């Protein structure tokens, strides 16, 4: 069976924009987030408190967060280390996400650390966040394949998932950073996680759509009982530190499928599509989402 309701974790303002070469003005980002909230999204990943040289597009986190902080939605932010946590807490962030890697190559490229050094870096971040009752998401990248290492063994992924849970993360997000997963692989990983004590209720999925598999992978996860799905308005996105990473699953494509299946999301597809069309005009490039294109050409 399928869940009655799915919580969409909207990552457009963070994962969607982080890879944009041209700087998007802070006020446009704030409008983007306001419009997403207005379209019914309730969890909107707003920005990252990372080193500004590593992700220049999100260097305005201090200016952006106060512009949207009062919206009646959850606004998680990425935080790699204690410096990032300090910055986020100073602005009143109530939800943070640390981001680990299942592979050594990506841990090095994205965090300048080994897998275990990165986990050690997150440990005090998670402990301090939990002590302040701040919700913590633990991302795990390269859960299926890695551009440098190829297919990633399930057991290697499970080890890091368990480390993140043991650290105190409230939820996990399984990242298919380069979009190579297929539905059988998704089900195999979810089953192995359950077998090793990670409950489905703590697991979200984060599919990039490079090979056009994101929606099929999402359906496989829903059939397994997953109810938290990451998506990016208009299919924006990619990771600057992962070769061959394209955009996330488009939120519109996800909502279209879920509406057809009778699964509630609370999202107004018309408003959301209008937002992505508006954003595409700012970025001077059409949205890659098939649903956005179909609905905006009607
Ligand atoms: P590092 O160079 O090893 O940093 O980078 P360090 O710890 O050696 O510190 C060097 C300097 O940076 C110090 O300053 C720090 O204070 C400063 P100095 O003392 O030399 O003047 N610094 C900071 N400044 C501001 N904010 C901070 C911060 N931290 C240190 N938070 C570091 C290590 C983790 C900082 C760096 O690698 C980094 O920022 N990485 C972020 C990369 C990133 O954001 N990637 C994209 C997000 S992950 C993703 O997209 C995948 C996901 O979508 C899931 C999926 O699809 O798989 C989540
Ligand atoms: Mg991502």
Image (cartoon, rainbow, N blue to C red):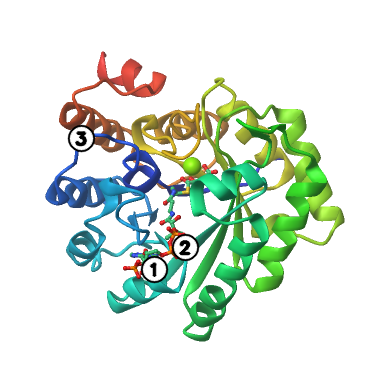
Query: Marks 2 and 1, how far apart in space?
Result: 6 Å
Residue 109: % across, % down: 52, 45
Q: Residue at x 19, y 41 (%)?
A: 23
Q: Quadrant of the C terminus?
A: top left
Describe the element under mark 3 as helix, strand or loop: loop
Q: Is residue 170 above or below residue 291?
A: below
Looking at the image, residue 99 sits to the left or right of residue 59; the answer is: right
Query: Marks 1 and 3, how far apart in space?
Result: 24 Å
Q: Is residue 94 above or below residue 10?
A: below
Q: Residue at x 17, y 48 (%)?
A: 31
Which residue in the structure is indicated by mark 3?
22
Mark 1 or mark 3, earlier in chain: 3
* In-front residue for pair 159/168: 159
Task: Give the image quarter of residue 236.
Answer: top left
Label 2 close to label 1 by CB (< 8 Å) = yes
Q: Quadrant of the N terminus?
A: top right
Q: In this view, which residue lies farthest toward the bottom?
A: 131
Query: Marks 3 and 2, how far apart in space?
Result: 24 Å
Which residue in the structure is indicated by mark 1?
84
Q: Is mark 1 within 8 Å of ligand 1?
A: yes
Which residue in the structure is indicated by mark 2?
80
């Amino acid at each position: 069976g399928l869940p009655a309701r799915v919580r969409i974790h909207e990552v457009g303002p963070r994962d969607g924009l982080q890879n944009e070469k041209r700087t998007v003005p802070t006020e446009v980002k704030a409008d983007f987030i306001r419009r997403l909230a207005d379209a019914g999204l309730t969890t909107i990943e707003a920005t990252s408190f990372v080193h500004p040289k590593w992700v220049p597009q999100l260097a305005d986190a201090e200016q952006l967060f106060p512009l949207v902080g009062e919206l009646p939605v959850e606004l998680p932010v990425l935080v790699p280390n204690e410096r990032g946590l300090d910055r986020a807490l100073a602005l009143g962030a109530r939800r943070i996400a640390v981001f680990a890697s299942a592979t050594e190559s990506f841990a090095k490229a994205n965090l300048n650390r080994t897998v275990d050094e990165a986990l050690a870096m997150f440990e005090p971040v998670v402990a301090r966040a939990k002590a302040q009752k701040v919700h913590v998401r633990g991302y795990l990248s390269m859960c299926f394949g890695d551009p440098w290492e190829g297919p990633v063994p399930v057991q290697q992924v499970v080890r890091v998932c368990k480390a993140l849970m043991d650290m105190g993360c409230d939820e996990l997000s399984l990242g298919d950073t380069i979009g190579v997963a297929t539905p059988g692989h998704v089900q195999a990983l979810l089953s192995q996680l359950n077998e090793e004590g990670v409950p489905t209720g703590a697991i979200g999925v984060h599919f990039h759509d490079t090979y056009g598999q994101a929606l099929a992978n999402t359906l496989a996860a829903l059939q397994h009982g997953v109810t938290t799905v990451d998506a990016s308005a208009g299919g924006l996105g990619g990771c600057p530190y992962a070769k061959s990473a394209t955009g996330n699953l488009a939120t519109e494509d996800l909502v279209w499928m879920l509406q057809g299946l009778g699964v509630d999301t609370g999202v107004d597809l018309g408003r959301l599509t209008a937002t992505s069309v508006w954003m595409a005009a700012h970025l001077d490039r059409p949205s890659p989402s098939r649903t956005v294109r179909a609905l905006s050409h009607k």
